[in-house]
């Protein structure tokens, strides 16, 4: 397949005139800020990321500050963003940047991709935005833009097809490294605002004259990916043990790996009977079932059944954990549904 002679030129001009320019991580060549935004934006909407991004920078203004922070503090600040492996890798990456590179992010995609949590596309974004390196990004939105522009009909469920798309993404990069920030941002903006998964706004697209999928009259046929991950479901019972004297709640840290790995959580049980068995017989009559609810993960539905228990003096749930007073637990790294469950009404 021969790529169109110039995708970069129209895209760069469009981005400078019509692309997004008001986001807080734009207009900077600080790799720390670009890296933080790129990690937060993985599978998370811009509107959700905005507040988290500003709070992270207020608390940890540079990579050295983040590297020195306790992991629990980082997880606590991340709580609610989801995909918590990103936060653990963020912390590890900051520590490696300090230890291996003296606190300065390396300037090339090849070096950046060796750091925890930085994949090929994220490494390319940092290298392009901050150092003008000619490196291709290929996140979900960009795959959609490029497969349509090139009418790339190979099945991206195949790793070989994805490698060929990477080669094409590299082939259409602008020749001038000075254009890389606008080109890279333009791909992101086009995928987020114009070249939508459904009902793409082709009349507004700067690539319309060269877009092979548009010429075929079927832009929504791309990208092609046949293999889909099967959704699963799991039911869990949550023991919400509260100490009446001070309102403290018992929380245990989740094992790694696993659901909510590394976060503080109410003790989880696979059945109501298993939860009952973890509570002394004298307390079982007072167990109070709260309304069940469903929490949706990317490929799994968690059906959660909270059960409240008044802790008798001297008793605590089995296993490693600790009592946290109402003033303490809000600062912890908690899964979003657990945080909502513990918050008082109207809190």
Image: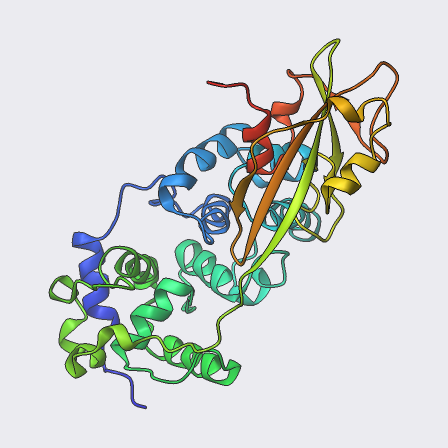
Q: Is residue 198 left or right of residue 275?
A: left
147 or 217: nearer the viewer? 217
25 or 30: nearer the viewer? 25
Residue 42 place in picture, x, y as percent: 47, 53
Residue 277 quadrant = top right
Residue 292 place in picture, x, y as percent: 57, 37
Residue 281 quadrant = top right
What residue is at 66 percent from the left and 44 percent from the top? 236
Considering only vertical position in the picture, is 305 above or below 247?
Answer: below
What residue is at 42 percent from the left and 68 percent from the top? 138
Considering only vertical position in the picture, is 39 above or below 79?
Answer: below
Considering only vertical position in the picture, is 162 above or below 106?
Answer: below
What residue is at 64 percent from the left and 15 percent from the top? 327
Q: Is residue 217 left or right of residue 75?
A: left
- The quadrant of the image that shows the N terminus is bottom left
Q: Is residue 96 visible?
A: yes
Residue 139 place in picture, x, y as percent: 42, 64
What residue is at 70 percent from the left and 52 percent from the top? 258
Q: Residue furthest left?
A: 203
């Amino acid at each position: 397949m021969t790529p169109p002679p110039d995708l970069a030129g129209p895209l760069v001009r469009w981005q400078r005139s019509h692309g997004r320019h008001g986001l807080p991580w734009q207009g900077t060549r600080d790799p720390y800020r670009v890296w933080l935004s790129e990690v937060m934006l993985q599978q998370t909407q811009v509107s959700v990321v905005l507040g988290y991004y500003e709070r992270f920078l207020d608390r940890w203004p540079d990579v050295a500050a983040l590297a020195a922070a306790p992991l629990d503090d980082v997880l606590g600040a991340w709580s609610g963003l989801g995909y918590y492996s990103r936060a653990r890798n963020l912390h590890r990456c900051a520590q490696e940047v300090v230890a291996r590179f003296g606190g300065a992010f390396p300037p090339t995609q090849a070096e950046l991709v060796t750091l925890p949590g930085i994949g090929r596309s994220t490494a390319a974004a940092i290298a392009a935005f901050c150092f003008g390196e000619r490196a291709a990004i290929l996140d979900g939105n960009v795959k959609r833009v490029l497969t349509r522009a090139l009418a790339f009909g190979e099945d991206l469920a195949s790793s070989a097809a994805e490698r060929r798309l990477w080669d094409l993404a590299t082939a259409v990069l602008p020749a001038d490294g000075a254009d890389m920030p606008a080109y890279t941002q333009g791909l992101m903006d086009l995928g987020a605002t114009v070249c939508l998964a459904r009902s793409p706004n082709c009349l507004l697209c700067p690539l319309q004259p060269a877009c092979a999928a548009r010429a075929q009259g079927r832009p929504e046929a791309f990208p092609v990916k046949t293999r889909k991950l099967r959704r699963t479901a799991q039911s869990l019972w949550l023991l919400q043990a509260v100490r009446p004297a001070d309102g403290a709640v018992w929380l245990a840290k989740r094992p790694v790996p696993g659901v909510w790995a590394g976060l503080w959580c109410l003790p989880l049980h696979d059945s109501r009977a298993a939860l009952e068995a973890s509570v002394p017989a004298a307390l079982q009559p007072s167990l109070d079932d709260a309304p069940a609810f469903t929490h949706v993960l990317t490929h799994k539905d968690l059906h959660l059944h909270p059960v409240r228990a008044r802790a008798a003096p001297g008793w605590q749930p089995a296993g490693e954990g600790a009592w946290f007073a109402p003033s303490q637990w809000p600062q912890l790294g908690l899964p979003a549904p657990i945080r909502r469950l513990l918050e008082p009404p109207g809190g």
